[in-house]
């Protein structure tokens, strides 16, 4: 197995597009170096990046799920009850619709 990968091989290993891999490398997120005009990545570094990213995203999902449990919903804050309406539900204040009955006109 090769120790070094070019941009296409690194992208294929991560199952992402070549342009996405290039953007990650350009930003310094994906460890690699340019030798001449070509990107070179170490297989271990690419797999290490993936492991770190898996852990980071997994921890984010766990934290979000815990926050949802604490808030008692889907990331929404609990309703605040006011003195106006203790049910926490919006009242049914509907405007009355205008009367649209057709009236007949007398011909004069």
Image (tube, grey):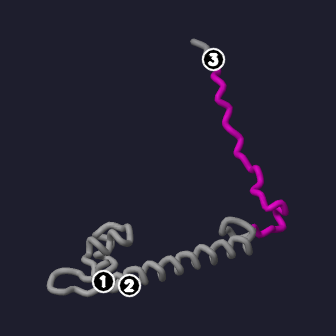
Q: Residue furthest top?
A: 107
x 23%, y 81%: residue? 39
Image coords of residue 72 (percent x, y)? 75, 69
Q: In this view, does 20 lie to the left or right of 54?
A: left
Q: Mark 1 points at which residue?
A: 3
Q: Label for residue 104?
A: 3
Q: Does the magenta stretch include residue 96?
A: yes
- Camera-side residue of 103 and 68: 68
- Camera-side residue of 43 and 76: 43
Report if residue 20 is visible in the image.
yes
Q: Name the residue under label 2.
A: 44
Label 3 with label 2: CB-CB less than 8 Å: no
Residue 89 versus residue 35 in the image, above or below: above
**Is the residue marked by circle 3 packed among few (<14), some (14-19), or many (20+) residues within 10 Å?**
few
Q: Is residue 9 left or right of residue 56?
A: left
Mark nearer the N terminus (3 vs 2): 2
Mark nearer the N terminus (1 vs 3): 1
Magenta residues, start to end: 79-103
Quadrant in which residue 73 is drawn: bottom right
Report if residue 26 is visible in the image.
no
x 75%, y 56%: residue? 90
């Amino acid at each position: 197995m090769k120790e070094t990968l070019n941009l296409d091989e690194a992208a294929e290993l991560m199952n992402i597009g070549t342009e996405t891999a290039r953007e990650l490398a350009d930003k310094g997120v994906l460890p690699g170096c340019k030798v001449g005009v070509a990107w070179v990545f170490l297989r271990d570094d690419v797999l290490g990046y993936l492991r770190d990213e898996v852990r980071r995203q997994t921890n984010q999902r766990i934290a979000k799920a815990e926050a949802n449990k604490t808030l008692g919903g889907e990331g929404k804050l609990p309703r605040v009850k006011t003195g106006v309406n203790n049910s926490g539900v919006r009242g049914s204040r509907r405007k009355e619709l205008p009367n649209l009955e057709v009236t007949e006109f007398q011909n004069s």
